[in-house]
Image: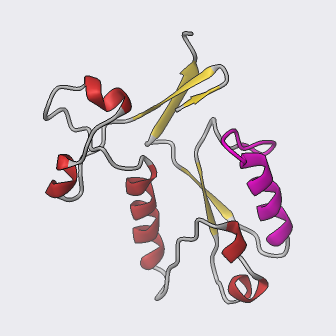
Amino acid sequence: LLRQETDCITSPTSCWHPTLSEETKFGHALLLAPGEGECPVDVAQSALTRLWDDLRTRHKNVAIVGDVDLLTIEFLSGTSERVLAKFPCLMDEKQWDFFEGDKLRKELLERTQEYPFKEWLLTDELRCHPSSS
C-alpha cells in the first residue's frame, strides 16, 4: 500500500491452509524466494481471524461487518460488544487515508454515536515508514 508520503509494508504471513500458497502472488510478494512465508491473501485476513477468535471466547454469536450500511439501529441495539479494527497509519482519529475513507469514517460516526466501539489495532500486519520516493 502507498499513501501520500508513507510506505505501508505488510509482514510475511503464513497461509492458514496449504492451498492458499498456490494463489497468484503480487506486489512485494513477487520479490520473495519460494518458501519465505509470504501468503498471497488479504493482509487483514489473519488479523480478523484473531479478532474473531478472541470475540468468540466471550460471545455465542460473532459477526464481522465490513459495510457501514449494515450497521442499522436494529443490528447495533442487539449487540453486547462492538470492535473497530483499525490499520495504524491509515486510520486515525481525524482521517482514514484510503479510497472513500473519510466518507466511511463520517458515516460510521453518525450511525454509531450511541453505540461505542473498542478499537483493535492491526499493528502486526502493517508497518509504515516515510516514503523513499
As drawn, 132 above or below 86: above
For image coordinates 17% across by 48% down, the residue present is: 22
As drawn, 102 above or below 57: above
Relative side of 62 to 38, left or right: right
As drawn, 132 above or below 25: above
| Percent of width and height locating residue 86 | 61, 51
Q: Nearer the viewer, residue 36 or 31?
A: 31
Task: Give the quarter of the image for residue 112.
Answer: bottom right
Relative side of 57 to 128, left or right: left
* Highlighted magenta segment, given as a residue range: 92-112
For image coordinates 74% across by 87% down, the residue present is: 77
| Percent of width and height locating residue 26 | 34, 35
Q: Nearer the viewer, residue 112 or 68?
A: 68
| Percent of width and height locating residue 66 | 58, 65
Based on the picture, tell me whether residue 95 belongs to the magenta stretch: yes
Task: Give the quarter of the image for residue 125.
Answer: top left
For image coordinates 86% across by 66% down, the residue present is: 110
